[in-house]
Amino acid sequence: MNTLKLILPLAFITGFASLAVAQPADYPPSARESIEWRDIWISHANETNLPRVLLIGDSITRAYYPEVEKHLEGKAYVGRLASSDFISDPALLKQIEMVLGEYKFDVIHFNNGMHGWQHSEKEYEQAFPKLLKTIQKCAPKAKLIWASTTPLKVSPTLPPDNQTQATDERIAARNATALKVMQTKGIPMDDLNTPMRGHPELHSDNVHFNDQGVALQAAQVAAHIEKQLKP
């Protein structure tokens, strides 16, 4: 198998982020987390005999990626772009532009919602259309699928003046924002939130999932992608 793997180290992140364009004036610059990471993996980079699929997301996406690839073996080549960047960070858009500029993808399954809790849901709402516009501009012929952000094992209760952590309420607000845009654009949604909600036995920690949870997600993701691969 011809596989190209690129995991961007922190030293490269700083230089890469400096290439990003200036933020629009309608929302403030994106504040970064103490550790930012990017993981780009393109399998069968030189082969063109099967459709090509890209999964865009974060560590949740990175976890179910291998199982999705197994489900779609012989049907499509599957790559991933996993990143911790918040939706308004121009570095995220640069990553998307870079990957979509190098390879043609027939289906793009994408999510962003589990990072950047130092940013308000209003900022998320303002930034979301640009994420979608970037993907559509760079891959105008690709079929898109939006994946909802998964729930937490235990959702903390935060006072109104402390909105700096993830909660299921905030995740639901971000999912609602994304769903509204998808419905307007006619883009199907892969609801990964509902099947995981209320099932702490599927988690490995408060955010991530164990093998059983990952397997359930991968099967659902692959099924949604297969529908888009059919003529």
Image (tube, rainbow, N blue to C red):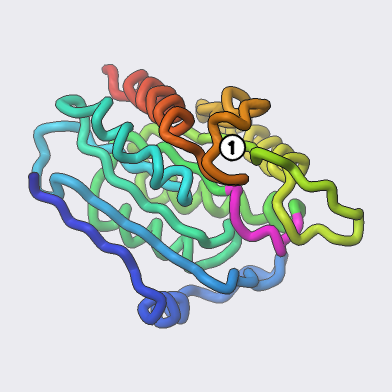
Main SS category, magenta section: loop
In this rendering, position of residue 230 left or right of residue 217: left
- The x and y percentages for residue 200 are 62, 32
**Compared to 47, does 191 lie above or below?**
above
Three-letter residue code for mark 1: Thr
In this rendering, position of residue 31 left or right of residue 142: right
Residue 119 within the segment the image draws in magenta: yes
- The x and y percentages for residue 93 are 47, 61
- The x and y percentages for residue 56 are 42, 46
In this rendering, position of residue 32 left or right of residue 161: left
Q: Which residues are magenta?
A: 113-120
The quarter of the rendered structure image containing the C terminus is top left
Q: Nearer the viewer, residue 211 or 5?
A: 211
The quarter of the rendered structure image containing the N terminus is top left
- To which residue does mark 1 refer? 150
Identity of the residue drawn at 73% across and 56% down: 165
**Compared to 139, does 15 lie above or below?**
below
Can I make out residue 186 in this image?
no
Q: Nearer the viewer, residue 105 or 222?
A: 222
In this rendering, position of residue 161 left or right of residue 208: right
